[in-house]
Image (cartoon, rainbow, N blue to C red):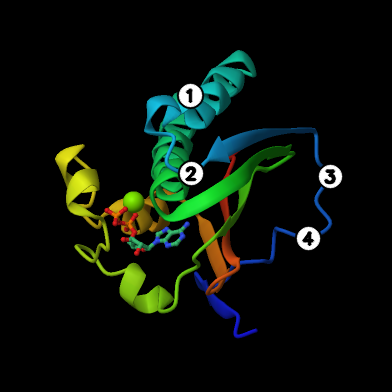
Amino acid sequence: MNENRWSTGESCVSWEDAEILYSESFRIVGDDFEHGGEAAAKIKAKLKQFGLDAAIIRRLSIANFEAEMNVIMYAREAEMQLQVLPNAVRVILSDRGQGIPDIEQALQEGYSTATPQMRQRGFGAGLGLPNIKRNTDEFEIVSTPGVGTTLRYTIHLQN
Ligand SMILES: Nc1ncnc2c1ncn2[C@@H]1O[C@H](COP(=O)(O)OP(=O)(O)O)[C@@H](O)[C@H]1O
Ligand SMILES: [Mg+2]
């Protein structure tokens, strides 16, 4: 198995050993455009309930929506797990699907393998992964072609 890996600079540091105050998982089903965005919306509602800073909720929601739609378009199924830590919110999204053969290329603004049908729905601008990168403090992609992709991203809380 050739696993591809990409991450932002100092990442992984705050990912290990952190106390998890709250965790919840949401299932995402490939090709299910009808329910596209529901996992991101549920996480947004939960974080509002927790009283998190609005700017942090907005940034995480943008990342979550982009990541969720990528599962719907490019994978078969996934679990999106929200974790609230003392100093951060983190999402781990593991999918079963085609995987990403060239992550650097996939991260380029404007790069997209979206089909004409997906473009008709308004997707395929090639800005999803760049937007996740821009809106998070730490971001890691691990992907194995033919097996699936795991995204992990974190936004720090300034308590
Ligand atoms: N979960 C995934 N599984 C497989 N390929 C993916 C996944 N997420 C993204 N990709 C690939 O990376 C490309 C860029 O993704 P993105 O920046 O979100 O743009 P877009 O969704 O508009 O194509 C996609 O077109 C696809 O080829
Ligand atoms: Mg996308």
Q: Nearer the viewer, mark 2 or mark 4?
A: 2
Q: CA distance from mark 3 to mark 1?
A: 25 Å
Q: Cα distance, mark 2 to mark 4? A: 29 Å
The answer to whether any part of residue 159 appears in the image is no
Mark 3 surroundings within 10 Å by alpha-carbon count, few (fewer than 14), some (14 through 19), many (20 or more): few
Within-10-Å neighbours for mark 2: few <14, some 14–19, many 20+: many
Q: Specify the quadrant of the image occupied by residue 90.
A: top right
Of the numbered discs 2 and 4, the one sitting upstream in the chain is: 4
Report the amino acid beneath label 4. Answer: Glu
| Distance CA(mark 4)–CA(mark 3) | 9 Å
Q: Residue at x 34, y 69 (%)?
A: 106
114 horizontally vs 151: left or right: left
Q: CA distance from mark 2 to mark 3?
A: 31 Å
Upstream in sequence: badge 3 or badge 1: 3
Where 4 falls versus 135 (above or below)? below
Q: How far, Cα to Cα, is label 2 from label 1? A: 17 Å
Question: Position of 7 compared to 128: left or right?
Answer: right
Amino acid under label 1? Ala
- Which residue was labeled with disc 4? 16
The secondary element bearing badge 4 is classed as loop
Task: Determine if residue 95 is in view.
Answer: yes
Circle 1 — which element? Answer: helix
Of mark 2 and mark 3, the one earlier in the sequence is 3
Residue 41 numbered tag: 1
Question: Which residue lies under the disc numbered 2?
Answer: 30
Identified by mark 2, the residue type is Gly
Which-is-in-front pick, marks 4 and 1? 1
